[in-house]
Image: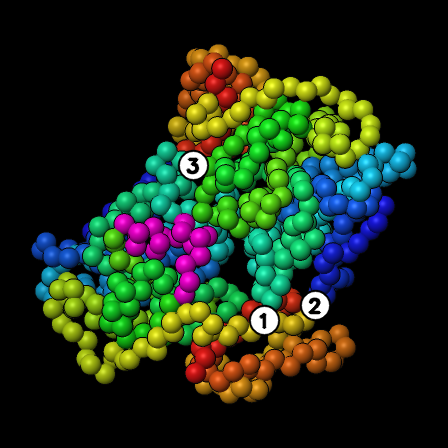
Amino acid sequence: MIQNVTALEMPVDEEFRIQKNHLSRGKGKRICIVTGTHGDELEGQYVCYLIAKMVQESPEKLTGVVDIYPCLNPLGMDAMQRGVPAFDLDMNRIFPGNSRGSMIEKVAHDIYTDLSGADMVIDIHASNIFLREIPQVRISEMCADTLVPYAKMLGIDFIWIHQAATVLEATLAHSLNSIGTPCLVAEMGVGGRISHSMCQHLVDGIQNIMYNLGIWSEAPSADKIGESIVNQGGDSVAFLNAEVSGVFITEIHNDVRVERGQTIGQIISPLTGMVLSNVVAPCDGLLFTIRAYPIVYEGSLLGRIHKL
Amino acid sequence: MKVQTIFRMSSPYRDDFRVKAYTFGEGEKSLCIVGSMRGDEIQQQYIASRMVDVLQQLEAQDAIKPNCSISVVPSVNPFSMNLEKRFWALDNTDINRMFPGYGQGETTQRIASGLFEFVKDFSYGVQLASYYLPGHFLPHIRMIHTGFEDVEDAKEFGFPYVAIREPEPFDTVLLNYNWQIWDTKAFSLYAGTTDVIDHSMVQVAIDALLHFMVKKGLVATKSKIEDVEPILVTNKNLVNIQAPHAGILIIEKNAGMQVKKGEAIARIMHPYEGKLVCEIQSPVDGTLFFVRNKSITFQNTLLFRIIKD
């Protein structure tokens, strides 16, 4: 059943609305699949489609509630902008919102209220247009004990436990986790694109969580749920930042093991034909992030390595 | 006057990115004024540039006090202003969400770090700030309630209003917050507009900055304004008025005007039929502190902030 989570007037003959697909059978537990917080992240669109299709093709296997929220930022999605057009705000920096605040604050509040109390929320992100990520779950260290077991059920490639940053307190995931509604943040792929295989892999993992929570009666086949690599944070991730401005060229894709000193790529000058910088791995490890957008300034992130 | 490039970075296709500081006097780092940090903060940059001119004249008159140095950073983000973008053009990040910065981090973290290294040891810091919503503010000094803020010092700008607000999670990455944490007495100065120059407000800001410098004994000159006991603006005496409906917005009162409870201050018109959708009335007696200046409104958009009498 398609439902409005919130609806507000726009200036000229249009209603702003956030919608969800409420799929329910019985009074079992509730899982929420949310995505589209950033208008340049599209991977979650296909995941939502696959989950809705799975439930609608086998409704007899549903033993609880699946709520699917494909787009928390419809204006950003429409304009292919990461933030919210007209407000110049990052939708994922204003939670839990404010029922008496501006339109976007009210929208954030209504989304947060609608999700509160769910037995599991999967918040799907797709990096941005600059970086390509392997499928991963990111967990603030303060929530690690609660969330890591769920993340492992996803069978996702990589689990990154990171330090809690104050600025991240305004994210949807932090807001929900802080009131006891478990929320996993999945990151994968690259902005503006959909990777079918990654999406299908995440759907298998979501099905496994649904099965373990008693929301779905059928487990995915065991070969679809792999072991996750868990990174404990701190200095166990190496960051590769551009030393100079220029154009980053690489032949490497992410999800590969690299060795200390191995060439990751080069920063070149199209004007002079010179190599401005050789980018090399500072350690052995798993390259889980690689830059997808070639133009770089000094400091631009080129990659991240899980140290091994 | 000493001109320094406090941060420089090459660009793939453009001239080098440079952040410049103008310093007057010598000795203890007394006051630093930071102008535009976003590409649309033209009012803020113009005020900073005018302060460079004012301080140059004071220095020529030998009016900068001994063992006192005053610096002005007119722009932290000239690249974005040249592109007419508010934030860093490549990735839309906001330098004022990157403090205290990180010299080995991403581009805007490095810019923030470069600025903060220069500004962090001053006794007083003033950021010429802008509001994220389009509109006009009464000129005022604003501080974040960190426990380090100093209301008595804020009064020395001679502004009739000093606003104090409670910190939000994102505040921890603002320049003003980090200045305070690093023992600089930090103030945000709001001077009316952002992307257009309001000359009367420019003069108000210059007079306030000069008044502060005189009161703090940093310069030997006469202030053009008198001391005033400012009204403290907090959540307790500030009333927000939001749009009950969306539509064409007709504002009928300007910032600074006194309004009475029940007085009409705006109308929202139907965008196709030209009919009145609703009239917005002031819910209190007071002074219009903020007035939106866009001619359309979404439902719930903040239109006015009124300081209650």
User: Could you tell me which chain the residue with mark 3 belongs to?
Assistant: A
The disc placed on residue B12 is: 2
Secondary structure type for disc 3 = loop
Q: In this rendering, does residue B267 appear at all?
A: no
Three-letter code, disc 1: Asn
The disc placed on residue A124 is: none
Spatial distance from mark 2 to mark 1, Cα to Cα? 15 Å
Indicate the quadrant where residue A162 lies: bottom left
Q: Residue at x 25, y 80 (%)?
A: A224
Q: Tell me, yes or no, whether dots 3 and 2 are on the same chain.
A: no
For disc 1, the marked residue is: A241
| Span colored in magenta | A162-179
User: Could you tell me which chain the residue with mark 2 belongs to?
Assistant: B
Q: Residue at x 68, y 20 (%)?
A: B227
Residue B32 horizontal side relative to residue A204, left or right: right
Task: Give coordinates of residue B293: x percent, y percent.
Answer: 57, 30
Residue A22 horizontal side relative to residue B292, left or right: left
Foreground pick, B52 / B177: B177
Three-letter code, disc 3: Ser
Task: Give coordinates of residue B27: x percent, y percent.
Answer: 79, 46
